[in-house]
Amino acid sequence: MKLVITANGFQKTEMCSVIEKARSYFDSVVVNPWGRRATQEEIRQIWDGADAIICGAELFDQALLAEAPSTLKVLSRYGVGIDNIDISACEAKGIQVCNTPGANADSVAEMAMCLMMACARQVVNHDEHTRRGEWKRFPCMELKGKRLGLVGFGAIGRGVARRARAFEMEVIAFDPFFNSTAAAELNVDEVTWEELLRNSDIISLHLPSTPDTWHLVNAETLARMKPGAILVNTARGELIDEEALAYALKDGCLGAAGLDVYEHEPLHESPLFGLKNVTLTPHCSATTPEAAQNMGMMAVENAYRALNGLNNAHLVLQKR
């Protein structure tokens, strides 16, 4: 069996154990040689004869999948989001699709808390002015006693809830597929979307990008948030209308925002640039060695299990 890895990052030293595991399962393993996200043309150069592909955020759209080798049976996503994969095209070609739910949950949950703290304590502004030799202090707030609204209560949302409890925050959550058992264990209250908007001091987004969640945070919903609230997004950039967010930050309707993801990446220009009440990071929530190894191991295991009809392959789309 042949495994092709188009995802970036597998060249790093900390991924040696992942490559070793892949070679123990597959007769041939081809690793992305470019040290960056592969283009579609580059993918075509290395995928001949592949039984499975481990992909990252590369675009596997209908046009590319139409040219896929007849041997290809599995797309194993190195990550959780599958919005870069045309699922209908995979189904038509009989290609199974897997992902790695929960593998990076700790890293992303920690980053969500980091952005909350950065916004609440004005870390970026304090750093900038201190480096200038200006002993300037900005208004801050404690997290203790504040109400955190989680939009999405999956593995990452639950990870944030655990950490927020350590800060003595009150936690509420909205999720169309709410996990009542986990909520009871973590002392998290289920609320409606409207209640969450109206009552949260901090809102943290943890939903996938779908047609239903596109621009979930927009001018209308921002206006319904608690005045001075903090918004954090470590999920998907498409969840937020960035023009509307910039306006809300400028006019003071929203207190601050901490963003690690954007509608168009990489981010080269944005209405958010220049605003002092927004903290921006380059989609790095899961870029820790621990998360990379966890996702890599799971992606390899998923590819092998899906090809061999074994259980626990974390199938998003299985063969008919």
Image (cartoon, rainbow, N blue to C red):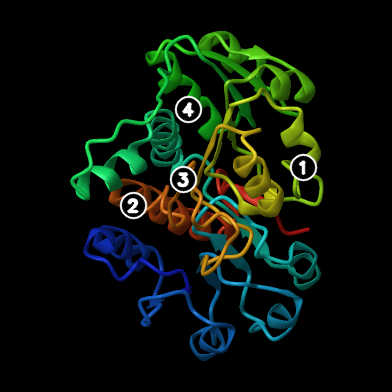
- Disc 3 target residue: 276
Q: Amino acid at mark 3?
A: Lys
Dot 3 or dot 2, earlier in sequence: 3
Tag of residue 11: none
Dot 4 or dot 3, earlier in sequence: 4
- Disc 1 target residue: 219
The Cα–Cα distance between marks 2 and 4, rounded to whole angstroms, is 21 Å
Tag of residue 160: 4
Disc 2: CA contacts within 10 A as few (<14), some (14-19) or many (>=20): some
Position of 144 with respect to 74 (left or right) is: left
Position of 200 with respect to 106 (left or right) is: right
* Mark 1 secondary-structure assignment: helix
* Mark 3 secondary-structure assignment: loop
- Disc 2 target residue: 293
The Cα–Cα distance between marks 3 and 2, rounded to whole angstroms, is 35 Å
Q: Amino acid at mark 1?
A: Ala
